[in-house]
Image: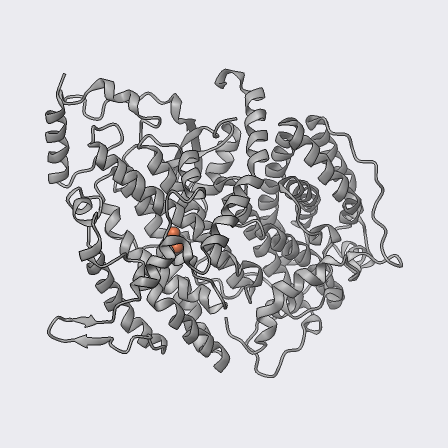
Amino acid sequence: MNDDLFGGDSSQWAFGTDFEDPLAGVDTTMVDDVVADDLALYCLGLADDALIMSQRLSEWCSRAPEMEDDVALANLALDLLGQARLLLARAAAASPSVVPVLPEGSPVPPEDALAFFRSAGQFRNVRLAEVPGGDFAHVIVRLLLFSVARRELLERLRGSRDQVLAAVAARGVKEVSYHRDWSARWFLVLARGTGESRRRLISALDELWPYQAELVRCGAVDLALADAGVGVDPTTYAGAVDAVLGEVFATSGVERPSRGPLAGVGGRLGRDGVHTEALSLLLAEMQVVARAHPRGRW
Amino acid sequence: MPGQADHQAHFDEVIARHDRIEPRDWMPDAYRRTLVRQIAQHAHSEIIGMQPEGNWISRAPSLRRKAILLAKVQDEAGHGLYLYSAAETLGVSRDDLVAMLLSGKQKYSSIFNYPTLSYADVGTIGWLVDGAAICNQVPLCRTSYGPYGRAMIRICKEESFHQRQGYELLMTMMRGTPEQRDMVQESVNRFWWPSLMMFGPPDESSPNTERSMAWGIKRNSNDDLRQKFVDMTVPQAQALGVSLPDPSLTWNADRGQHDFGQPDWDELFAVIRGDGPCNTQRLAHRRRAHEDGAWVREAASAFAAQEEPGHG
Amino acid sequence: MGEWPLYEVFVRSKRGLNHVHVGSLHAADDEAALRNARDVYTRRNEGVSIWVVRSDAITASSPDEKDSLFDPSGDKVYRHPTFYTIPGSVPHL
Ligand SMILES: [Fe+2]
Ligand SMILES: [Fe+2]
């Protein structure tokens, strides 16, 4: 019997107790020709996408079709949560002015202040991430649309002049590639499995497709950072995203949905802080404990 | 052909030398039945046990705590899976075992029929409930049935992270605001007695203990383990700065162990009967997940059948 | 439609070591089994390579070949006839 069962190397644990500083060991120097607020907003967009997706995915914990899928879904949520944390920390370091002000002496770290003390209008995630959950087909379609686009983004972001973004992208691209392949496989399985699974898949696709265009839309912040070699202009990978989705649809024998993109409000979309009705409800739940203890230590 | 008596003698000899019984070995029917029941109940407990803490994932108050809690609850799903696999080596199917859970024919640990009412409960469950589970489970790494013991080794390694994260959360909260400290104490008050009940009824009213120990399925009696747990926990509570809600809890220098009070066994038996605060809710949650997933499982099977006609 | 079949999972924990049996899982097909194995059995960086094989594809020897006590007809009783002992010397298993 292995007697040092409980000793040993704590680095083997997925989450030990030693990941206090999310940016430890990464060069956090700012690229000098970038507006700090732009970089912060850019990071918030990518962070909020991951955070809200993670929140929706983690709602599946203890509810998946099989135990194996329960474990898989939690892994996806954990990957995105990790990305969110790094990116929020980067946003805060780039421009402390984006971080909500807490009572004097509050020990809440800036990335948590950003996650738990901003209101819906300050979140910059795409609306796809926040749509309330449906059935398992809904999970698969949302994850496919999201991860195909995020993978193309992260792949290009590895070359960012910002060392933190480059590091997040280098790790994230591996994670999100797996998410894409995992969801693409399930997409195929549901499309070809049974009549019911196909019907559910197509209905989820019809519901979520109008949110897809927002993933590859280029805003002013994207453009400014792309020009500086720090961010990526989404229109540069829109074609690649389209090609991957086209391949998944073709292999699965599913027609590309015909509905057009979901309109914004006065031209403003998720990245601009204009969301669906679902986001403030999601945040009310996510933030309730943290907000009750603005001086709390966790 | 060897006869029944030879089989029995060989089995007895393996048990006597503290060796392991493996799946294809001959074993007495009662040994097999006892193992299936025990492993299945253990597996059900892991799966149902995801719910009380899962209840707080969406509300975890920091990103770090959210990641830790999600990873922890995910581990419990893994534990259930390892244990169902071990039970399957005894000739039962996971489907059948899950059906017995859902129909109420097989039980799970009653501790999970208590509600989680504050975020401190996440810490208390890690510290006390996973702590009690570790006391129960470490000896099972040496259980006589090989696959069960191997599943337990894997599980115990992961459980040590569970207990540490729980205790660390409580420690951190105790360094926080007065409200947080009250939250911790209130949570410990609620979970202390149910944790003691996790070791099962007192030995004199635990009919199966003796036989299970003789077979090497169980390695320690309920009361021994409960004592060990109390002795281990008291100094941890002191270090934390919380009190344990038992006026008769004192150090007994003669015994070199703590004296402590008895839990309310009537309450435990009520919870076991199905009248606990959350019994209905926990099973309903599990049933809904199982039913909602049926079309997905069928779709995957149908797809596999198309892809691999050879496998049928 | 019945239960997803059972698979056995083998993980190479680092280069230079053999694949070692780590446990089992259910999956609808081989590809899903491989993904599930990655998600379930390598959550803590335990592996650099994974094998999965359907449990019913494994042919197993008798538990104790030399032992005349073993009754070959006993084979058929179990749906899931084999589990491999993990050597104590393998780290983190
Ligand atoms: Fe567990
Ligand atoms: Fe645990």
Q: Is residue A12 above or below residue C40?
A: below
Q: Would residue C68 be visible to someone looking at this image? A: yes
Residue B22 in the figure: left or right of residue A229: left
Asked where in the image residue A182 lies, by quadrant, the reply is top right
Q: Is residue B46 above or below residue C35?
A: below
Residue nearer the viewer, A246 or B79: B79
Position in image of residue A233 (x %, y %): 78, 50
Q: Is residue B105 above or below residue A132?
A: above
Question: Looking at the image, which residue is at 52% across and 32% down?
Answer: C32
Residue B168 in the figure: left or right of residue A228: left
Question: Looking at the image, which residue is at 49% across and 27% down?
Answer: C2
| Image region (quadrant) for ligand 2 | bottom left
Asked where in the image residue A97 lies, by quadrant, the reply is bottom right
Position in image of residue B265 (x %, y %): 29, 63
Q: Is residue B254 above or below residue C51?
A: below
Residue nearer the viewer, B191 or A136: B191
Residue B255 in the figure: left or right of residue A165: left
Asked where in the image residue C10 lies, by quadrant, the reply is top left
Q: Would residue C61 be visible to someone looking at this image? A: no
Question: Looking at the image, which residue is at 48% across and 78% down?
Answer: B176
Residue A47 in the figure: left or right of residue B300: right
Residue nearer the viewer, B84 or B308: B84
Position in image of residue A230 (x %, y %): 72, 56
Q: Residue furthest bottom?
A: A104
